[in-house]
Image: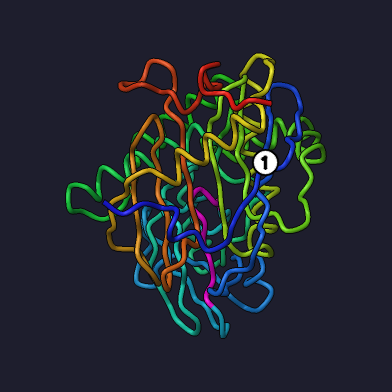
Amino acid sequence: MPKLAPRLAVQITVAEPSVVGSLAVFPLMAASEPSVRYVSFAEAVQGGATVKELEGGASVNDLVVHNPLDVPVLLYEGEEVVGAQQNRTFDVSVLVAANSVLRVPVSCVEAGRWDGGRHTEAFATAPQAANPRLRRMKNTQARTSLAAGMDARADQSEVWREVADTAERHGVHSATGAIDDVFNRRREQLDTAQRAVEMRCSQVGMLAAIGGRFVVLDHVSEVEAFAALHGPLVQGYALDALEAPDAAPPSCDDARDFIELLLGAPCTPGPAVGLGEGVRFAFGGLAGTGLICEGELVTLTAFADEPGDDGPALAGRVRRPSRRRPR
């Protein structure tokens, strides 16, 4: 089976982490530039790109993207958009071709609102992406759906249940069942974490550890596109970190081993929404998805198994002493 390493669009190195409370974020730095060029949705909005409800009648699990630009637009898995009839997150990472219109799969993260009076309204970018716990569940469901020969979609009822559980754990009542209300209630703490985790020059990703265990890796090959996602992703990490006890963070050597395991994981190719080809993997306690375009790995999202999951769950833990490199 093919592996991820040969498709890596840019060579990446791991930098020292930013640590705030139970959250440690290791920046992934680019040592080269990708060939495939694109912009983030946040950048594209400034040029007239929009995400809207379907024109013929809204669908909970579908939105339409209008890209009038001469470059592709990236919609990143877990990225949240707010407004129109109800708030949504993207189920998969998508490259929308230049000068095109594309229907994309989404999940609703606001169960109690269906405002037909706002049907024609364009969505706005949210200040946060979905938290890793929710994203991991959605990613697992999308991969399972693909493996069964269906579209890559999350289970909407499970998404609503997880949003409700998250609100309950944080003691937040939302009149519309919106995950956005949970983030807003914790915004001061999340903003503090975001300020502590600064975007760095040439950064193209992050590996986040919570409570001493690796949880999620996010990689976007284009520096400017990743920069637009940096803050929202950190806000998502920080929300989950509020529930975790402080713990000593993994080391940079641990982070390098995590990435080495990830890039060596066998992966299964499959269809993508929009440009390129999708890949999915589940190996060594790691699972996730990537998007390949013109032979380059444009995005990569990887989640570590949690304690108690079926399987070894080795990837989320600090390495065993026998695997440590001599100093």
220 w.r.t. 301: above or below: below
Residue 21, picture quadrant: top right
Q: Position of residue 14 (x, y in %)?
A: 66, 43
Any magenta on residue 78?
A: yes
The quarter of the rendered structure image containing the C terminus is top right
Secondary-structure class at tag 1:
helix
Q: Residues within 10 Å of mark 1 (few under 14, many from 20)?
A: many
312 w.r.t. 25: above or below: above
> For the point 49% across and 85% down, which residue is it?
99
Disc 1 designates what residue?
234
Q: Residue furthest front?
A: 326
Please provide the residue range marked out in magenta: 72-80
Is residue 28 found left or right of 155 in the rendered image? right
Is residue 41 found left or right of 287 in the rendered image? right
**Count of marks, rendered view:** 1
Residue 156, picture quadrant: top left
